[in-house]
Image (cartoon, rainbow, N blue to C red):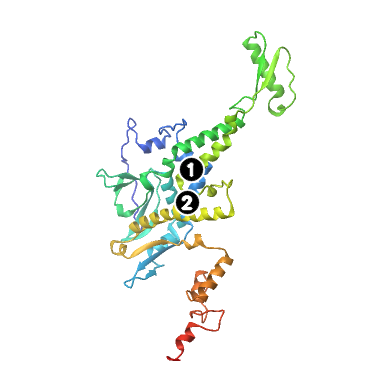
Amino acid sequence: MLDRPAPLLSYQRKSLSTPDAELLTLFGAGAPTAAGVTVSPGNALTVPAVACAVLAISEAAASLDVKVFRREASGADTEIPDHPAATLLRDAVNDWTDSFTFLRDLVAQALIYDQGGLAWVNRVNGRPVELIAYDSSHLTAQRHEDGTGACRYFLNGREMPPADIVHLRSPFGRSPLSLARESIGLALTLDAHAARLFGNGARPSGVLTVKGKTSPDAVRKIREAWHLAHGGANSGKTAIVEGETEYVSLTMSSVDAQFLELTRFQVLQIARAFRVPVTMLQDLERATWSNSEQMGREFLVYCLEPWLRALEGCLRRALFTAEEFATHRVVFDRDDLTRADIGARATAYSSLIASGVLNANEARGWEGLPARDGGDEFGNPFTTSATSAVAAAPQGA
């Protein structure tokens, strides 16, 4: 029987007179940005560039194969596919969550929330049997008062041992979303302005001037008659105005003409905050075949790799016993992200086999193919010589 902690009726009290960050986020009452809007995880993800950056990092990390290795006395690493941690991270972390969804959401939480991504490890007889990612309001992390950077963890109001918590932290103790709140706030403002602009709310299409003194009631009737005759489906038709009136059309100013440039600049700012190449946010204005390939490599090296290292570290700390920690580690297989096309792989295999770096069965293993007879010998397939024949030759020959 699994031993999940039951919810407690007594939660930690939070004062509304001095609300903390959790309450501010919950009620959307955080300090507004310079643009005048409040940025929270909820409305920040409505900015397409933010949602794209979060998905690009979290889904890329979760799509990799996860393996558990043990370091032997000889220094070689041996994969342990039947280790409980490997089973959880490969198949399903609990009865209702597959491993891909768990890892994706854990990384996404670290990108969105300042406290990072949190999950509880359920153990039976010291072995991990479940990983459960609770909502951020149920499982929380609080920095310890001693200044060491250590955290205290509370699950439904009950303090939990740090060894039972998977905690993926962002740099500086702040999430990329929180650090980029000003840029995200401006992006939200630009989106709202565009919606009002194209909904004929941000700027009137023109000014109808009535010459002479006119009562407010007469102005209202003229406005209603104008909209009835030339608004909605009648927009664009020839206007005929009775009496001493003049219509002046309003054109878009040079500032409004810069709207597209301002929007693109905010996409670039958000890409910088998450360290994602702007081409991965679907901004292909200056993309070419060569620089897109280079930016893809930069995404793997400078953006995804640090998150994978942090993810491997927090999983290793929480999933292995004290005896296993010195020799066991969790590894995400990066080869899936760096695999070239079939033509480039075939050329590389031919070169490596011909030079004796790989044998045929090792190359077949990289491709997920079974070994074949005679494939363990090293030799150049383009010549008749083989290292096995040289080794079998008598000495002095």
Q: Is residue 172 left or right of residue 221?
A: left
Q: Amino acid at mark 2?
A: Ile
N-terminal of the two: label 2 or label 1?
A: 2
Looking at the rendering, in which quadrant would you find the N terminus?
A: bottom left
Residue at the outermost left position: 146
Within the image, what quadrant is residue 329 found in? bottom left
Q: Residue at x 49, y 45 (%)?
A: 271
Residue 123 position, x and y percent, is 33, 58
Residue 224 position, x and y percent, is 67, 19
Q: Is residue 87 left or right of residue 254?
A: left
Within the image, what quadrant is residue 208 found in? top right
Q: In front: mark 2 or mark 1? A: 1
- Residue at label 1? 270
Q: Is residue 111 left or right of residue 260?
A: left
Would you place residue 247 above or below residue 183 in this image? above
Within the image, what quadrant is residue 124 found in? bottom left
Residue 275 position, x and y percent, is 46, 48
Front residue of 392 and 281? 392
Front residue of 72 and 159? 72
Q: Amino acid at mark 1?
A: Ile
Q: Are the residues tagged 2 and 1 within 8 Å (C-beta)?
A: no
Does any portion of residue 258 appear in the rendered image?
yes
Report the disc number at residue 215: none
Q: Is residue 178 left or right of residue 288?
A: left
- Residue at label 2? 57
Disc 2 from disc 1: Cα separation: 13 Å
Helix, strand or loop at label 1? It is helix
Residue 191 position, x and y percent, is 55, 35
